[in-house]
Image: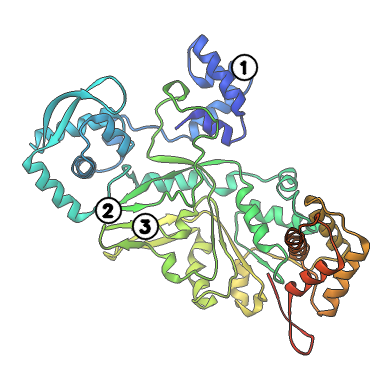
Amino acid sequence: MSFGDILVAKGLASPEQIVRALDHQKTNGGRIGESLIALGVVTQEQVTSVISEVPPAPLNLEETGVDPVFLLQLMLKGMFLERMEVPSQLAEALKLSVGIINKLLQDAKDRKLVETLGAAIGGGGAIPEMRHALTKAGREWTQEAIENSQYFGPAPVALEAWQDRILRQRVTNETISRTRMEEAFQGLVMPERFLMRLGPAINSGNPMLIYGPAGNGKTTVAEIIGKIFENVVFVPYCVEIGGEIMKIYDPTIHRSVEGSSGVDTTAGVRVGPIDRRWVPCYRPMVITGGELTLEMLDLKFNPIAKYYEAPLHVKALNGTFLIDDFGRQLAKPEQILNRWIVPLNSKVDYLSLHSGKSVKIPFDEIVIFSTNMHPNDLMDPAFQRRISYKLETLEPPEDLYKRVFKTMAAKQGLELPESIYQQVIDGIRLAEAPLAYFQPKFIVEQVLASCKFEGIKPQFTPQNTEDALANLFIQSHSKSKMGVMR
């Protein structure tokens, strides 16, 4: 994990400044933070603040917070399943220090589970390391451990450490200013009043409901909210709960800041011993839609591998969880809402293990319900009170619609003649359809596709505009609108 990556991800330094600091460090020695301070890139206070947020590496077995026997089993699985022999290989796999691995190896040798084979070139470089192998007793002991759980990978963090980290990384620790709101939404044409109401909703950290007609930017707004944050949060690969593993880090959801600086991670870049069991990430954004079921909000136990996978909302902790197309899930809206009553009210959630044990965790994330259905059709007044912010995305007024259309056309190098614009407005009125923010982009894409097919310069023509409108709406035989593409 590179300290430079974290600074770049937080916007405190640029990749070019990290390179300059590395050159300074090679000449003057010291740590990367000291070089950045000397060059005037960051202040001592900023470096101290970042260091205080980083989970420190455990210096011994006790500081891992995990049962040493559990770690011993995990290490031996690596030797059995992956044929790992030297401490550096095991340290990289378990994300622990070589010193801790050597302690575990010594314990294994004392138990007659491991034997020394001799010196070899280790996986960490040209330094000779002792090779190790399982004894017969070690293989039997490890096979029994594998029968209990097939998990092998980074060592888990303790449940208490994870709970504490969630609280330290609250969404409300970060304040979104009006300037940052304007920067984040600069590519989206929206009413000023809507954005000014949205800002306080984000800063509150409370749930919000975004509703309105289809095609007016609800999902886009929610996605921007998920990306507007700048703070780095630390996500554990997995957590140990009563001797069982729950995997949390998901590379399809969590965006690691690793590599943000564009500098190779070397010993010279490190600020100090950092606990590699945690992955520095941007605040997560989880999006789910009609596929959401109640089961997806529960711990998922793999009966073959015998470990847990965290549910979606747990992977979204310290970030944003969007329930898109709310009201169109297989489960009834009231069933989904009832599942959220406790987390939204008390800011805690309870996860149930298959053994019957329940685990309490802090619930810190912005939950966004997005729907094109009327809120009164989805939830009763009691639950509406639990959603602090309710924002409606209305149909655009014609002046704003025209602005969106011209902007979309200009992005593609197209000029929007007044006659074409009027043709679009007349076509929408004829279809008895409302104006919607998505329509200009849809029409522009249709026109570009038509011009490409015809082999002509991209341009609006009455014919390709008419064709675009025909694809925009489905007409019944009575000429009335039957549907609008989203």
The amino acid at mark 1 is Leu
Q: Residues within 10 Å of mark 2 (few under 14, many from 20)?
A: few
Secondary structure at badge 1 equals loop
Cβ–Cβ below 8 Å for labels 1 and 2? no
Separation of residues labelled 1 and 3 (CA atoms): 45 Å
Q: Residue at x 45, y 48 (%)?
A: 251
Separation of residues labelled 3 and 2 (CA atoms): 15 Å
The amino acid at mark 3 is Glu
Q: Where's residue 267, x and y in %? A: 42, 22
Q: Residue furthest bottom?
A: 478
Q: Residue at x 55, y 67 (%)?
A: 289
Q: Residue furthest front?
A: 455
- Vertical side of 139 occupied by 85: above or below: above
Task: Compare residues 219 and 245 and report the one nearer the observer.
Answer: 219
> Which of the two labelled residues, at mark 1 and mark 2, occupies the earlier sequence position?
1
> Which of the two labelled residues, at mark 1 and mark 3, occupies the earlier sequence position?
1
Q: Quadrant of residue 379?
A: bottom right
In this figure, which residue is indicated by the disc labeled 1?
39
Any mark on residue 242, and which? 2
Q: Where's residue 290, x and y in %? A: 54, 71
Secondary structure at badge 3 equals strand
